[in-house]
Image (spheres, rainbow, N blue to C red):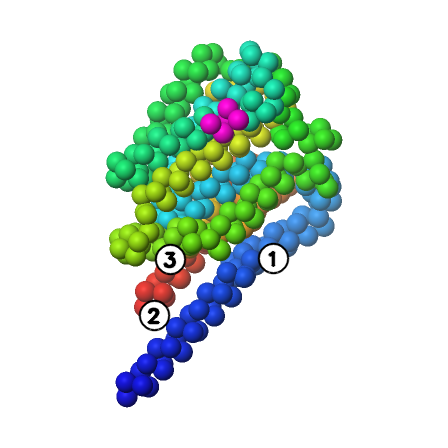
Amino acid sequence: MSEMTSSATRRRAGAARRHDRRGRRRVIEGQEMVLVIVIALLWVVMGVTTPTFVEPSSIFAIFYTVAPIALIGVAMTPIMCAAGIDVSVGSGLAVVMVVVSKLIRDFDANAVVAIVVAILVGSALGAVNATLIAFGRVPAMVCTFGTLNVFRYLALQVFGETQVAGVPGTLAFLGGSISRARLLGLPNAMWLAIVLTAIVWVYMRHWAAGRHVYAIGNDADAARLAGVKVRRRIFTLYVFCGSMVGLAAVVSVGGGGLIQQNVGIGMEMSVIAACVIGGTSVVGGRGTVFGTLLGAVLVGSVQAAVIHLHLPTEITQLFVGVIILIAVGVDLLRQSRRAES
């Protein structure tokens, strides 16, 4: 009897290892494939009804809009997989943008200096959240909701005026619409987001530290007992999110011109929507950065479709809200079935 039980245990362990190996090799998950099909159908329908939708300039505009959301989503996905969240990214984006734009305009900083400063300032803001959450044990939602308001106040103080005008196009190669700001029809910023998405995907699938993120999201106490350095992992995730906010700010400053005080408002909801629509669980333990990238592209495509169909822009919020509700419903149903099994 004991031999039969032992044999069954070995078979189950072997099946689990094979399933895990297949999961690590799999780039596209089930929900991500659904998103690919939905995006393709949307583009085909819009291409038939409004041919201007699939023109190169329109495609460029979609990905140009999506790029900052995708960049922050690259970092928000592992945070949500670890059962955390960061709702301060929009205010952090405003702080970095005004610092970078003034640095370029008032001190004639070149692109390299501007990018380094943006990443450092974003990382510093992320470190504030990381310290409070990882070592201060402040719940992530409460902490980042507080810093959302603190960062916004800080941004307003740095602005010192209602707007920053006359910003040179020093960073146009990443955030502008000029010819050297694109490659194969896509904005350079979107290529940057795609490359970073691939790197983070490999990290979360094939590195032990990346796999720990899912373990923390499933059960932080169990992960800690298993030897995972939970606080260190969480600290790193929020600092990384800050650095991605810095890169997104570089893209958003882009071609220069005018930077207004209301910049970044609502960005956090766009990023979280992209994560949820892409299949990242709202309770942690599940999600992929490729899903988030596709979720961002779907949101951007819906926004473009509303514009091309000459519908009120408020309809976009309705469509995105319905998609989020469906995604959350599917996730909760999946969680319920997993608990029952």
Q: Determine the main secondary structure of the stretch shown in magenta.
A: helix
> How far from the left and from the top, in percent, is residue 103?
53, 16
**Which of 9/53 is in front?**
9
Q: Residue at x 45, y 46 (%)?
A: 77
Q: Which residue is mark 1?
A: 37
Alpha-carbon span between mark 1 and mark 3: 22 Å
Q: Which residue is mark 2?
A: 341
Alpha-carbon span between mark 2 and mark 3: 14 Å
Give the amino acid type for the residue marked by disc 1 in the picture. Ile
In magenta, the rendered stretch is 116-120
Splitting the image into 4 quarters, where does residue 115 fall? top right
Q: Which numbered disc flags the more N-terminal residue, 1 or 2?
A: 1
Extreme-bottom residue of the structure:
1
Alpha-carbon span between mark 1 and mark 2: 29 Å
Asked whether residue 181 appears in the rendered view, the answer is yes
Membership of 118 in magenta stretch: yes
Indicate the secondary structure of the residue bearing disc 1. helix
Q: Which residue is mark 3?
A: 332
Give the amino acid type for the residue marked by disc 2 in the picture. Ser
> How far from the left and from the top, in percent, is residue 283?
35, 51
Image-based side of 329 in relation to 306, left or right:
left
Residue density around tag 1, few if under 14, some if 14–19, many if 20 or more, within 10 Å: few
Tag of residue 51? none
Give the amino acid type for the residue marked by disc 3 in the picture. Leu
**Which of 40/126 is in front?**
126
Membership of 217 in magenta stretch: no
Indicate the secondary structure of the residue bearing disc 3. helix
